[in-house]
Image (cartoon, coloured by chain):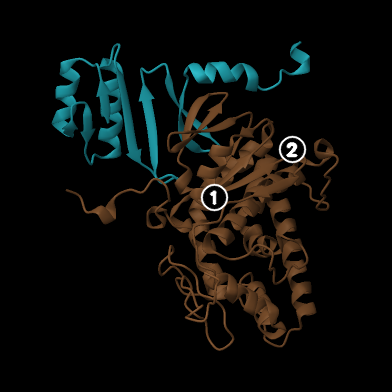
Chain colours: A brown, B cyan
Amino acid sequence: MTDPSNAIIWQRQNLRELPKFRDGTGYLYLEHTRLEQDGRGVRAYHPEGMLTIPVASLSVLLLGPGCSVSHEAVKALSDTGCSLLWVGEEGVRLYASGLGETRSAARLHRQATLWANPQSRLRVVRQMYAMRFPEGLPDDLTLQQIRGREGARMRDAYARYSAAHGVRWETRQYKQQDWNRATPINKAVSAGNACLYGLAHAAILSMGYSPALGFVHTGKLLSFVYDVADLYKVEVVLPIAFREAATPGDDLERRVRTGLRDHMTRLRLLERMAADLVHLLGGDDPDPEPSAPGDLWDPSGNAVGGRNYAGDDAGSRS
Amino acid sequence: MTLEAVPESLRGELARWLIEVQPGVYVGNASALVRDLLWDKAVQHTRRGRCTQVYRAQNEQGFVIRTHGDGARRVVSLDGYQLVAVRNARHAELSREYAPPEDDDKL
């Protein structure tokens, strides 16, 4: 006889068997595909044939034009903490996501606390900028000076890659209306950014933070996604985007995605994202018992949840 | 490596190098050179059978898949991510609906 505690409960995903974000694979991009659930797995009917997708180890599924998804498939994806991301040809992104793998709000509380206090928020913002300068930033710089340095760093990076690959660089354009008339290098950067934003979003959710509470960026529902993606954009997206834009041939966006996969593996990006998030916002491992009821808030200390506090004076109400 | 419906001599050859865990399933730790020689040998002697080989690699998935001799199952690489594509009845039914639109210049 097997131990009943190890019995597989099909009704509810056992959270311990889900791989953590850093151990999984990154992204998968599909076009002209129909996703359906089959038994316990997710099947994709792709022009090449029927693919069975290992969703539990996947962080983001990027769906391009011509895709449709059944209700059951979305449920399976959200159970395993795989984010869904609809990507249009014009670079328009539309997000949907499951709950992520964590069931505790400890990290989100911590993020909100850091975000709500201007001093701690400034500390996190400085840390985020400092991560991009290997030589470090002097402590006496104002935020305005730091932003100036960051702008110069971006400009230098574009100029450096532009010279190295012989691709002319003028300015970053976001032509949402006119995708086909954008320059190849702008298309390549946009395609790469879509992958990076998707991964940043998935990392934030699967670690249990909120994508809306940004520190550097503010006001958008995905501000924190832009914060995290900006930490890596120069070293992750630019080399691949310029390399592929310098190479003649069509299928530019596909080549960028293929090149990014190897490049991200070399940089161990998923591991680093997870580690950097915890380093920036702090936080322990907030998953003591994911299925236990949560506490009830009280200013003098939380009351234990999952019980009835009516006592004997409940009257006729029961 | 796995073998299906292949000549007995090939199975014997593979068993010299690898351990046969189940009928037709061979596991071992061989060098890249031996791995490729065994694969070439399997492909040459498979005749009407099927064989697969999966080996460790330094890519995102951590392994590479190769298959030979199976018309219905093919390994496809989606932006560098390997998956197995099966062409079955349901796929044939849907592919008419979901085929990418034809280019205007072909019409």
The x and y percentages for residue B98 are: 64, 22
Q: Type of residue at label 1?
A: His
In the depicted structure, whether residue A99 falls above or below residue B34: below
The x and y percentages for residue A94 are: 71, 47
The structure residue drawn at horizontal position 39% and vertical position 45%, both measured from the top left corner, is A10
The x and y percentages for residue A264 are: 53, 52
Q: Quadrant of residue A134?
A: bottom right
Pointer 1 residue: A263
Pointer 2 residue: A89
Distance from disc 1 to disc 2, alpha carbons, whole Å, reads: 23 Å
Q: Is mark 2 on a helix, strand or loop?
A: loop
Q: Which of B98 and A166 is in front in this view?
A: B98
Tag 2 or tag 1, which sits nearer the N-term? Answer: 2
In the depicted structure, whether residue A278 falls above or below residue B31: below
The structure residue drawn at horizontal position 54% and vertical position 50%, both measured from the top left corner, is A263
Q: Which of A181 and A116 is in front in this view?
A: A116
Residue A166 in sight from this viewpoint: no
Chain designation of label 2: A
The structure residue drawn at horizontal position 54% and vertical position 62%, both measured from the top left corner, is A273
The structure residue drawn at horizontal position 70% and vertical position 60%, both measured from the top left corner, is A222
Q: In which quarter of the image is the N terminus of chain B?
A: top left
